[in-house]
Image (cartoon, rainbow, N blue to C red):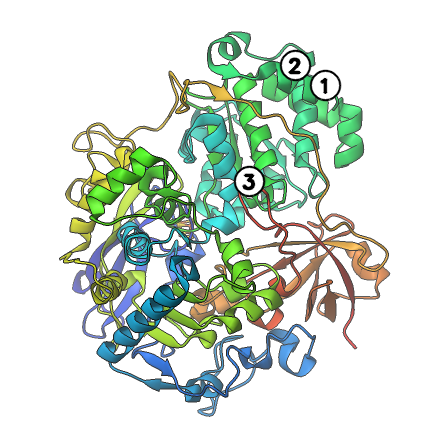
Amino acid sequence: PIRPREELDAVDSVCPYCGVGCALTYYVDRSRGAIAFAEGRDQPGSKGRLCVKGRYGWDYAASPQRLTVPLIRVDSSYPKGPLSADVRGDGDRERGRRGGKLSKNGKDGRRKPGGLVDYDEVLPHFREATWEEALDLVARRLMEIHAEQGPGAIAGFGSAKCSNEEAYLFQKLIRAGFGTNNIDHCTRLCHASSVAALFEGVGSGAVSTTYGDVANADVVIITGSNPTANHPVASSFFKQARRRGTKIIYVDPRASTVSEHADYHCQVKPGTDVAFYNSVMHEVIRLGLIDLEFIKARVSNFEELVRTVNDYPPERGAQITGVDADLIRQVARVWGEAEAGVIYWGMGISQHTTGTDNARCLIAMCSITGNVGRPGTGLHPLRGQNNVQGASDAGLIPMFYPDYQGVDLDATRRRFEEAWGVQLDPNRGLTVTEIIGSVLKPGGVRGMYMLGENPFLSDPNTNKVRKALSQLEFLVVQDIFMTETAEFADVILPASSYLEKDGSYTNTDRRVQLGRKVMDPPGQARVDWEIVQDIARRIGLDWSYASPSEVFDEMVALMPSYRNLRHDNLGLTGKLYPNADPEHSDGTVVLFDERFNTDDGLAHLVPAQWLPAKELPDADYPLVLNTGRLLEHWHTGSMTRRSFALDTISPIAEVYMHPKDAADRGLAHGQMARVRSRRGVIELQVRISHREQLGNCFIPFHFREAAANLLTIDEIDPHGKIPEFKFCAIQVEAAK
Ligand code: SF4
């Protein structure tokens, strides 16, 4: 029976999916121990709104497939991580077709969740263990590898799904406990290149203004982003602003739904962003629409930029990008003449081998027109995961301690050594992409602690990741489900979902909010920060944190940007950082009103020449693959594919194709296609889509039964070390 609202417990929390971080309330029926429904609540960045994931996507936490007891591998003859044969990369149709196990009923006759690890197949290779035994084994094996092969043989992947406090403790464990900076998380796969460019250009990796500030802009550029699917509530702010008169310039190879709300849609060819923005800047400068006063007072290296963009007249820009030269001119005029403009960008900018160069161009676009430091102006990389901003802030990256303080700066390191009471590694650690490569080399990483990441499906070139994970001497995975990566583990620790713990999360706007515990973890599953603390104690660290707020206080004391924030002054709507007076203020919306965060206070322009993607189409592989997300699913699908509503709306992996590309190959809508790259092959259903450009295909990476990353290339951006998820060459044919 559905109980009336008054009989339900209301718990105020935040959505666990995207970087928008909508505020919501869960209504809990304690008599059933279950959430009855979720509702948006008022907060400056969400105003009571929720998308389908926030409103319906929480039931995965009650899935019968939750890990509830520690597991230890027993069967060494069982090849590590065989992936149940259905993520094989050889196009095996019996296993891979039409959503894999989606339509197969379990022994009890009930529908099995689609495309997930087959527990019946995997679990016999593990045995249940006590927490004592599992934690002792983890500590002993990691310390043995550390003693025999040195600190560089250990690495940790943290999670942008965990809280700030958990991210802080996890990086502290790897750094203080194992003496290495080999610690990273999925920021490496989303905005690492944007952060690299922003640090270099303006001295801070966070956004310079909020997405709500779109209301004050005359014009916005939304680029490399499909906000309707990936940042749905932020996208509603963009659409509302347009109704009030803000012009939208949309620059993206796909004609996603936001293109229908745009005043100008520049459908660039994939991988040509540098050429497009250089051309726009060429025209802005030629028309004299730059802000000379701003440039003189606050920008360095403008002359070098002028020399570079001089080579990109609109005609050349049109030739490279496929966008009409007149449209480039129009965009330049609209952007240059606006009083206030913001650029919002997504992973279509960052996930390229030229990702840092792409973001450098956006910084230059804003800097030369004076579009930074005032309401309605600025730079905003739309962060992907709910806490990727916070996890990065908390130091879950190999080159920085918390608050982006360099590990290779002596004075900084001494400060952290003093605070943590240990000696720290003076060298930068390896990134996610480098760690995978290192495992395959002599003298590389041998032991890994994986907290809430699923690199098997999320990292590029799955077959390379498979090889690396299976070669590790010891892998511990801490997660809430038996993920594809957990199949490779020696020990699996059952962890807590965000519904089962307290902690703070920082959204794309720099808003630090509290997530509150709704229910207890199932079975013997435990809260993540407590598990990390237990391992820390076993390897000799003297930790005795009693609560997440105690961890938060220690973290904030080391992070000038978070100064003044405490759990008890975040309130129900959270606070933006920096914040001089959280008791009375929501925090600072617009940064850099007087100076940038760089040493000299100036914006440093770094001009970029256009370079093509690493693997261009040819006669054998004539199409370009772009990977990304759908509205209803999240990353590797471990949460959303166990959500009844979300998996019901979007149950099947599909390749999105331009009608002519499909027709040329004799493919009809709904037909099975075989998609092949130089690295692997998958089979999935065709979706004819007028949103794709001729010659380009789109495949979401949520579906293990058609794992898009079997196809992707593991070439990386030299600065941000981010993979080129948005471009590789493929061929598509009918599945026979
Ligand atoms: Fe959750 Fe993002 Fe949707 Fe908001 S927009 S409800 S944060 S997924």
Identify the element where label 2 is drawn: helix
Marks 2,3: beta carbons within 8 A: no
- Separation (CA) of disc 2 from disc 1: 9 Å
Q: Quadrant of residue 426?
A: top left
Quadrant location of the N terminus? bottom left
Q: Nearer the viewer, mark 2 or mark 1?
A: 1
Residue 310, labelled with which disc? 1
Q: Quadrant of residue 622?
A: bottom right
Q: Quick check: 105 above or below 18? A: below
- Separation (CA) of disc 3 from disc 1: 25 Å
Residue positioned most to the bottom = 107
Residue 341, labelled with which disc? none
> Upstream in the sequence, badge 3 or badge 1?
1
- Residue 295 on image: x %, y %: 52, 12
Residue visible at 59% across and 73% down in the picture? 705
Q: Which residue is mark 2?
A: 285
The amino acid marked with disc number 1 is Asn
Q: Nearer the viewer, mark 2 or mark 3?
A: 3
Residue 719, labelled with which disc? 3
